Image: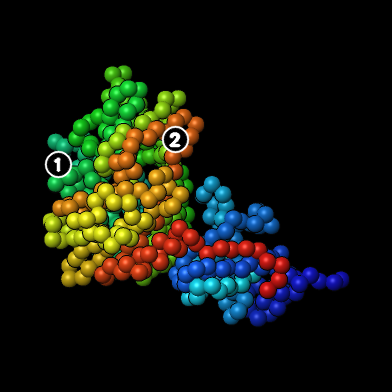
């Protein structure tokens, strides 16, 4: 019987690598990754899962030029299934790299580099046993019990650097309503009433965790999805959930720099619209370490080269907040996705406190309507060491304009 070129390649690879028997080899495809206009390294690559593999849970990916097996993973949690891997070795601008992806093989035996565990109160994510972040799904109680209105769930804290330092903060006495990484709206109009999901002391509204929908680790990334409720506390008949929000968080298998994505999807929880009124702050927010409190302890760097004195209400593609943790500098960069509403979004860069947010409502009010979704996507880069504007920009290009992947007939 005449064998297809794909089958012959499977046989050759099986002999070269010894990872699986010829009888175990399944169908495969050839792929080509194009760097595009910029060089790539430690870059996330993804593509829609081909129909050929729609019923598969594990696959094996080979780089053809050096016969190297590359960890690959199927994302089962997003709106569509995707193949995801990390292009670790440099790929110069304007060049391509070819792969073959197969069913069967060693893909199911690869080490789970990113782990996600649930201890009953938190989802804890690690890369190669290094802690990256904790998502709090149980209520975290405010330190002062006469201020129980600050109790909080549905947010990320602590956030760590690769060297193990905590870089975020929670319940800081100056603004105890700022919690690690959170997404809250400061001024909301619902059923004609104004409420406030940002400042918990107002007791007009709150944002809290509802449920953990899923979580899993893997060789390329670990991820989890959760549901968060935005609740109106102003209705005389009692609290009512205005918005349902889903977080999809994906943490990548990079241990010298931490890289993770947060995709927020908000929908109306009733048949009534929710209006986010105009105000200069609120939205996707990060609060930096307590050691950074004070005008001289931290700074910002934006994609436009601005800092805390010049960057407030500017519209950059990314913002880095950085300062000393002990003797060394560390930083957090948030990358704004070009598909976001009002991209590039305005930012609130506080001049004396280490927090900032992408304040999309600072331009004009906007309304989330029943049956529609409001999607926000951000990538976080957390590192030890001083800021590097060139690296931040390269990471944003990787996020905003990732390498293109196409199926080819033969290498």
Q: Quadrant of the C terminus?
A: bottom right
301 or 186: nearer the eye?
301
What residue do we see at 68% from left, 66% from top? 408
Q: Position of residue 350 (x, y in %)?
A: 20, 50
Q: Quadrant of residue 410?
A: bottom right
- Check if mark 1's residue and mark 2's residue have beta carbons within 8 Å: no
> Residue farthest to the top?
237
Task: State the residue in front, 97 or 38.
Answer: 38
Q: What residue did someone put label 2 on?
A: 267
What colour scheme governs how the chains and residues are painted in the rendered image of this protein? rainbow
Query: Neighbour class for label 1 at 10 Å: few (<14), some, many (≥20)?
Result: few
Q: Position of residue 254 (x, y in %)?
A: 41, 67
**Residue position marked by numbered label 1 in the rendering:** 144
Instruction: Identify which residue is drawn at 39% across, 32% down.
Output: 367
- What is the quadrant of the N terminus in the image? bottom right
Q: CA distance from mark 1 to mark 2?
A: 33 Å
Numbered disc 1: secondary structure: loop
Q: Nearer the viewer, mark 1 or mark 2?
A: 2
Res 41 → quadrant = bottom left
Relative to residue 29, is residue 187 depicted above or below? Answer: above
Specify the label residue 133 is tagged with. Answer: none
Label 2 neighbour load within 10 Å: few <14, some 14-19, many 20+: many
Q: Residue 336: where, in percent of width, then height? A: 38, 53
């Amino acid at each position: 019987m005449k064998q297809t070129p794909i089958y012959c390649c499977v046989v050759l690879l099986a002999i070269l690598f010894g990872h699986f028997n010829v009888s175990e080899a399944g169908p495969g495809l050839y792929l080509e990754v194009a760097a595009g206009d910029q060089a790539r390294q430690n870059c996330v690559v993804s593509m829609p899962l081909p129909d050929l593999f729609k019923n598969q849970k594990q696959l094996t990916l080979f780089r053809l030029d050096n016969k190297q097996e590359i960890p690959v993973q199927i994302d089962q949690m997003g709106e569509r299934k995707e193949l995801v891997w990390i292009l670790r070795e440099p790929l110069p601008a304007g060049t391509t790299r070819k792969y073959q992806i197969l069913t069967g093989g060693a893909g199911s035996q690869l080490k789970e580099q990113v782990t996600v565990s649930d201890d009953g109160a938190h989802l804890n994510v690690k890369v190669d046993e290094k802690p990256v972040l904790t998502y709090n799904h149980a209520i975290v109680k405010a330190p002062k019990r006469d201020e129980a209105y600050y109790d909080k769930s549905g947010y990320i804290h602590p956030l760590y650097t690769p060297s193990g330092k905590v870089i975020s903060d929670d319940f800081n006495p100056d603004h105890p309503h700022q919690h690690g990484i959170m997404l809250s709206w400061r001024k909301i109009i619902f059923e004609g009433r104004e409420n406030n999901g940002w400042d918990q002391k107002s007791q007009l509204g709150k944002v809290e965790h509802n449920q953990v929908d899923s979580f899993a680790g893997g060789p390329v990334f670990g991820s989890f999805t959760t549901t968060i409720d935005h609740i109106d506390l102003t209705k005389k008949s009692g609290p009512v959930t205005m918005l349902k929000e889903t977080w999809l968080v994906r943490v990548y298998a990079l241990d010298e720099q931490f890289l993770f994505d947060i995709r927020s999807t908000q929908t109306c929880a009733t048949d009534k619209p929710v209006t986010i009124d105009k105000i200069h702050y609120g939205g996707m927010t990060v609060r930096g370490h307590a050691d950074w409190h004070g005008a001289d302890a931290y700074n910002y760097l934006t994609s436009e080269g601005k800092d805390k004195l010049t960057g407030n209400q500017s519209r950059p593609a990314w913002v880095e907040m950085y300062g000393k943790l002990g003797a060394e500098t560390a930083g957090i960069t948030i990358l704004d996705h070009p598909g976001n509403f009002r991209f590039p979004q305005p930012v609130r860069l506080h001049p004396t406190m280490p927090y900032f947010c992408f304040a999309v409502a600072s331009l004009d009010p906007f309304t989330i309507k029943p049956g529609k979704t409001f999607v926000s996507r951000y990538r976080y880069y957390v590192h030890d060491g001083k800021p590097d504007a060139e690296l931040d920009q390269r990471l944003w290009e990787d996020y905003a304009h990732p390498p293109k992947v196409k199926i080819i007939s033969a290498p």
